[in-house]
Image: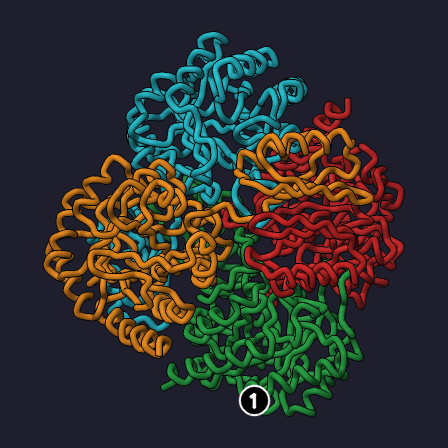
Chain colours: A orange, B cyan, C green, D red
Amino acid sequence: MIIVMERNAAQEDSRMVGEKLQEKGFQLHVSRGVERTIIGAIGERTEAIMEMFETLPGVEKVVPIVQPFKLASREFKEETTVVKVKDTLVGDGNLQVIAGPCAIEGRDKFLEVAWAVKEAGATMLRGGAFKPRTSPYSFQGLEKEGLEILSEAGRETGLPVVTEIMDPRIIDLVAEHADLLQVGARNMQNFFLLRELGKVNKPILLKRGPSATIEEWIMAAEYIISSGNEQVIMCERGIRTFENYTRNTLDLSTVPIIKQLTHLPIIVDPSHGTGKWKLVEPMAMAAVAAGCDGVMVEVHQNPSEALSDGPQSLTPDNFRTLMGKVKKLSGVLKG
Amino acid sequence: MIIVMERNAAQEDSRMVGEKLQEKGFQLHVSRGVERTIIGAIGERTEAIMEMFETLPGVEKVVPIVQPFKLASREFKEETTVVKVKDTLVGDGNLQVIAGPCAIEGRDKFLEVAWAVKEAGATMLRGGAFKPRTSPYSFQGLEKEGLEILSEAGRETGLPVVTEIMDPRIIDLVAEHADLLQVGARNMQNFFLLRELGKVNKPILLKRGPSATIEEWIMAAEYIISSGNEQVIMCERGIRTFENYTRNTLDLSTVPIIKQLTHLPIIVDPSHGTGKWKLVEPMAMAAVAAGCDGVMVEVHQNPSEALSDGPQSLTPDNFRTLMGKVKKLSGVLKG
Amino acid sequence: MIIVMERNAAQEDSRMVGEKLQEKGFQLHVSRGVERTIIGAIGERTEAIMEMFETLPGVEKVVPIVQPFKLASREFKEETTVVKVKDTLVGDGNLQVIAGPCAIEGRDKFLEVAWAVKEAGATMLRGGAFKPRTSPYSFQGLEKEGLEILSEAGRETGLPVVTEIMDPRIIDLVAEHADLLQVGARNMQNFFLLRELGKVNKPILLKRGPSATIEEWIMAAEYIISSGNEQVIMCERGIRTFENYTRNTLDLSTVPIIKQLTHLPIIVDPSHGTGKWKLVEPMAMAAVAAGCDGVMVEVHQNPSEALSDGPQSLTPDNFRTLMGKVKKLSGVLKG
Amino acid sequence: MIIVMERNAAQEDSRMVGEKLQEKGFQLHVSRGVERTIIGAIGERTEAIMEMFETLPGVEKVVPIVQPFKLASREFKEETTVVKVKDTLVGDGNLQVIAGPCAIEGRDKFLEVAWAVKEAGATMLRGGAFKPRTSPYSFQGLEKEGLEILSEAGRETGLPVVTEIMDPRIIDLVAEHADLLQVGARNMQNFFLLRELGKVNKPILLKRGPSATIEEWIMAAEYIISSGNEQVIMCERGIRTFENYTRNTLDLSTVPIIKQLTHLPIIVDPSHGTGKWKLVEPMAMAAVAAGCDGVMVEVHQNPSEALSDGPQSLTPDNFRTLMGKVKKLSGVLKG
């Protein structure tokens, strides 16, 4: 990190900063300009260290130089991580498509849509059992019963299944039924949950928080990895901006960025990323062309009867069309 | 809610929408214009209901008309709620000042700062035992030991104590030691936690999430109230915007807005709201002039040695100056 | 528009609102619920009309129902507009690629890069003569001399040329030298300029403002069209969000949205949209897959010597690679 | 500025960066760590210089260290600038209140409201003659006639008058009629206009752009000052964020920040800053408590008949109440 001293900082102040830096194990490089002294400090910086120096007398600001993540970084591990979800590989160069309804609403309906997405070419099945909803008066999911339906559908269709986990108290229950555990956008900085997921022997799908910077998102992956679980898939699902024609602003630049900064695979969710089914297909195409490892799409037999996220769900027919286009595109890009 | 049909929607589509609305118990008012049919639907709308109608054939959009919160609203309860924290009243017209360090770092240091803020005029004491940190490598708090130090300091000084609760598994533990339980900004939409806090017999301090709309924030309060706990204090602490000179953008308009829309008290945290100690005093003054019920300020003996949030902490001396100004201002405004 | 009366609004208030609506030529549809009266008003709403009703006694809010743009809308003109830039068609289903340096820095260098992009396959040439720069101390462009170089390069290479126009006083001068006049992001709501451009007999490239909603952006096009010039091409170039790893957040959902809401063609600028040359190629690919009519890319012989926007410029070699990929992708998508 | 080399940058790359820096007149301080070389460069950095170095081979990023503004900075001129508007001083410690309608709608109405605000205690009069409106179909102002009415009202009441200038072609005309020229939020980065205003012998009121960072806003002032006009008053009027309950998010932290970073006075516009008249008074109070030099408030005889910005306008009665409170507060703070 770089410590910029105030314009008229006393020599004594610079000396004190230097001493403290050495105490903390930093190597020093001091540049004394006409107007200002700048101190380069080489060593392991943390938030706490930066904050400490920012408040010393005479310090104007502290500028971080290197990224705060380690285990997740491409610098730490050059080789791309391939995450294994049951027998499906994410990050090996093939496109994976996760499909299914936002919420599991009942056994028969879910099995029906599970078969429909499988036949259309989906390679994983999604379905929510515990639903985070803005309003306490909205449908909150079938909970335990939903998990059982999900795992049954996985067994029947042979598709790996993914569902959201929100509460550290039920990790074991969810891990028993699902092949891939999803951390939802609202829980991306639920650090207690992240640490527990680091101890689980299942891969994790880590959604970006709607107001999380790319650095914070990677730091959330760092929590999981540093707690012992390296099987992390990143999922871009849009950020909150001033634009409200779409539900979120899907930030597709994260696809190449995550691949440049980390060794983790990344998939894209154009359903939440736009909130409008008419935008799902063009955004899925764009995500694939940007180089993602997979897409996650909401599909519902009858979106107008869905108990959650209807407006962004495709019908099985629309999904089949999308699969055709996306597969063709993916093939051309690989060729 | 209002259902706007597409410009060339078939009559059949409008009829179908009308039937479904009646099925769901809505009263109908249909306006047929030259270009477009608009259907007013009077009844209880939820997210799920709105989403369902948004996907029916021929529907262009669904516009919510009334606010989704009930129990928190000023319409539901006209009288202002006064929240009792031990023997201190929040919302009765007197200004409360919560002060203390971001994190509890040790018994002796915490007792020292506790006495210092009490002598300067603080009316409640804050201190973090479990700290949510962006990096897994930062100090995460003294945890259980921190809670014990906090409650000891509360007993010694006679000040009510407030601390953050992040994990539903330790609510009982925290409630045993603290007088006011704080939901941090990152957990504002941790709905499992909110529901559990609705069952606790302690008041809740609900921080606004950095990307939460005012409506979502009030809905988080609605979760707590509808689960049984009406003792909720709102806390504005800044939102995330494109501006990065300050850590957050403190949105003081929420002070009059929360008072207009709800019956709940609201306090303001200018320390997190700006991230720079030089801005804390002017923003605290502004918050009081806007009409808030209290302010929450970080104070540390030696901000440059703080293990968390040093740059936004006041020294006890600066805090004493702030208290003098804030009290004088509050007195004038009441007079 | 819909007028929502306050919960306890007097009957007299509703009557007054109704009368004023009729005065202004609106048709009325009144829905009287148990708690609230809602008035549907069918007619031509403008900002001024909405604001007037919002302040009448007893009115809680006014909700717009139909979009405020007319001439730009797909409802008004179903057929897609094809814009002719010299002899090149934008919006006819073929992909156009506009390339060149951010600023024109000298005659020889510009001609060199002009030939380089032409040989690589670009179909239009860009170059800035008047540069809007955040700092008054930065290079502001070669101005008139730059325009002459630009038009010479256009004549030599046969490529249509595009440059930015910022000042209504020099429209004639710029129109004399350029084939396509670009409104920069910072001037998207410079309404005086927009109106003057409506009187020009040259096509306009309208960049989205960094904080403009999609609706405001279309309204800027409406200014130009309603002043007499229908030859408008929209250009997405990223919006300002809290994320600062990229210079802007490129919002590719605008590609399908502009095509759904308007009849205008849309191109995408991944250079400004990301600010990092390593992201230009994947984002250009994504834009094409999303269905845009063209891309605009910054190319410079030697980005590290560029006087403006070096970090987001491709070298001619990188541009040639991008052209190869983008053409192949575009061919597959059409096929 | 600091140049951070890539982790595995060749020695040759660092050498080349060093040479180029010396060519451009920078002093060098090189820190060679185990993993990375960091080069401190002391000298005059501009956008163009930073961009050039960002693209050199082996460079990871360039970090600016000192602020890019000079003439506007408190470091350059320690003494606070007091701006003289006719005979009224802005920035001398007294609170100025600018009041009047958004748009001038006619002679008699404007004179009436001018006298009303004067009697209530306003110290300057505002009124728009040229109105920037999102829609080409909205009222655009009385233009030249409006200016004449404005200056007449100024002469009659003795109040200095302020109005917006949007077009460089009519600066002389506007300067002839107004005492203070306002740059509107949408033109804050209309650099042609800013430069022309630097040559005018009238003070400038510079509104913050809705998506402008504080640094960009100060750079806009720098444009005016560096072109020759030091009489600049900053005006905070809210920024665009995801929150849409208010029209903008009023960022009151800019009051102390502008005072810390620059020597310029700052006033606050709570009418545009919130868009709701019920929030104007509390936000005006907050702005004064934060230490601003003045407030600007929209007042209209009959907001529901206003042709522009009705919902955020106070009636003369409400304005009188606000003046009473604001004056009392200002007196207490000075005392």
Examine the rendering and report whether any part of residue B324 can be seen. yes
Give coordinates of residue A175: x percent, y percent: 21, 45
Residue A255, above or below D263: below
Amino acid residing under circle 1:
Thr
Image position of C34 (left or right of B23): right
**Dot 1: few (<14), some (14–19), or many (≥20) neighbours within 10 Å?**
some
Residue drawn at 24 percent across, 50 percent down: A163
Image label count: 1
Quarter of the picture holding the C terminus of chain C:
bottom left
Q: Is mark 1 on a helix, strand or loop?
A: strand
Residue drawn at 47 percent across, 60 percent down: A260
Give coordinates of residue D300: x percent, y percent: 67, 46
Give coordinates of residue D235: x percent, y percent: 71, 46
Residue drawn at 65 percent across, 80 percent down: C162
Give coordinates of residue D311: x percent, y percent: 58, 48
Chain of the residue that carries numbered disc 1 in the rendered image? C
Residue C239, above or below D332: below
Q: Report the front residue among D30 and C12.
A: D30
Q: Which residue corresponds to mark 1?
A: C88
Quarter of the picture holding the N terminus of chain C:
bottom left
Q: Report the front residue among A22 and A3.
A: A22
Q: Quadrant of residue D128?
A: bottom right
Q: Report the front residue among A127 and A25.
A: A25
Q: Quadrant of residue C183?
A: bottom right
